[in-house]
Image (tube, grey):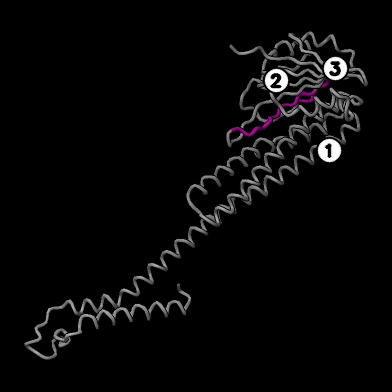
Amino acid sequence: MDEAPKITIFAYSGDKFEKKRIKKVEDALKYKDYKVVWVNIDGIAYLQELKEIFGFHEVAIKSILRAKTRARVSILKDHIFVLLHQVYELKGGLKKERTAVFLKDNFVITMQERPGDVFNTIRESILHGEGIFRKKGPDYLLFALLDAIVENYVPILENISSQMEVIETKVLKDGDKDVLRKIHGIRRRILFVRRTIFPLLEVFRRLRLEGKELFSEETQRYLEELYSHVLEVLDIIENQREIANGLVEIYYSTLSMKTNDIIRILTVVSTVFIPLTFITGIYGMNFNTHVSPYNMPELNWYYGYPATLLAMLAIALGMLYYFKRKEWL
């Protein structure tokens, strides 16, 4: 039986802090006197309660329920809704999960599909009073949560870069079909991350331009940095796409070079055997040496067979020596 979605409260005002596990969303209102109340819900649940208690818009509630919704933002008169995705590495692949963030008054509400997220550093900072979280308002917490999600893309991209370096070595060394399969796997991951993060540009652009009334001037500057951060991540992704495409070209170039080497060797072998085949073809003809002295008199020679073999060997070695000097081998 699945566990009920977990609701955790982080409420703080300067030196005053409280962390609590609650059972109902409405219990969060008991902490409204704090400067910031962060309500974290592990699981897509309590949507109707959130709508009734906080007055969140119906469009936001429906977009959370749609599994394939892209990142989006809704900026209303009294609250902000942001929907984006956290990305995780699972068994060599990537998986994303929806994460909804609401900001209304002094409440910041986060909701994700399952337990486990990228917010642990923020929780630890708030819990131990480190950093500037307890000195800032809910708008700064919203920025920090969004920044943590974007920052989580960086180690994933770094891991992809490391994998590409390993694969590049294998391409130059082996160039087998398994390497090509790995390259295509990496390209799919890069495109997956790009499709996930690209819509954030529009999300953060709108937050900067349309959310000024709900953000302090300082937090607006942080949002500009966050927008720049997304651009930097996208630059990394574009560079990785170019590298991955280059690896495919290197693979086919290496494969073509190997094919050319094989063809060159086969051509040399065939060329060497052409005169030898010519000789054996001549001596394979049937002539009667008793009818005419010109009908292959060497057929009656005592050393004719070994002499012919030695001549053929000399021709083959001479041709190989010539090819070697010409650097065709």
Q: Which amino acid does the dot numbered 1 rest on?
A: Glu
Instruction: Single out the mark in the foreground, 3 or 1.
Output: 3
**Residue indicated by mark 2:** 59
Q: Quadrant of the N terminus?
A: top right
Q: Position of residue 278 (x, y in %)?
A: 25, 78
* Cα gap from disc 1 to disc 2, whole angstroms: 26 Å
Identity, as a three-letter code, of the amino acid under mark 3: Ala
- Residue for badge 3: 11
Residue pictured at 55% horizontal, 52% vertical: 170
Residue at image point 76% right, 27% down: 119
Task: Identify the magenta region.
Answer: 74-90
Label for residue 235? none
For marks 3 and 2 on the same chain, the one whose residue lies earlier in the sequence = 3
Q: Which residue is mark 1?
A: 224
Decide whether residue 165 is among the magenta residues.
no
Earlier in the chain: of badge 1 and badge 2, it is 2
Element type at mark 1: helix
Q: Position of residue 254 (x, y in %)?
A: 52, 59
Q: Which dot, 3 or 2, sits closer to the camera?
A: 3
Residue 329, above or below 59: below
Which of marks 1 and 3 precedes in the sequence?
3
In three-dimensional space, the C-alpha distance between marks 3 and 1, rounded to whole angstroms, equals 27 Å
Q: Say whether residue 83 is magenta.
A: yes
Tell me where residue 318 appears, x and y as whole percent.
37, 81
Image position of 221 (left or right of 41):
right
Query: Which amino acid lies under the numbered mark 2 shown in the image of this protein?
Result: Val
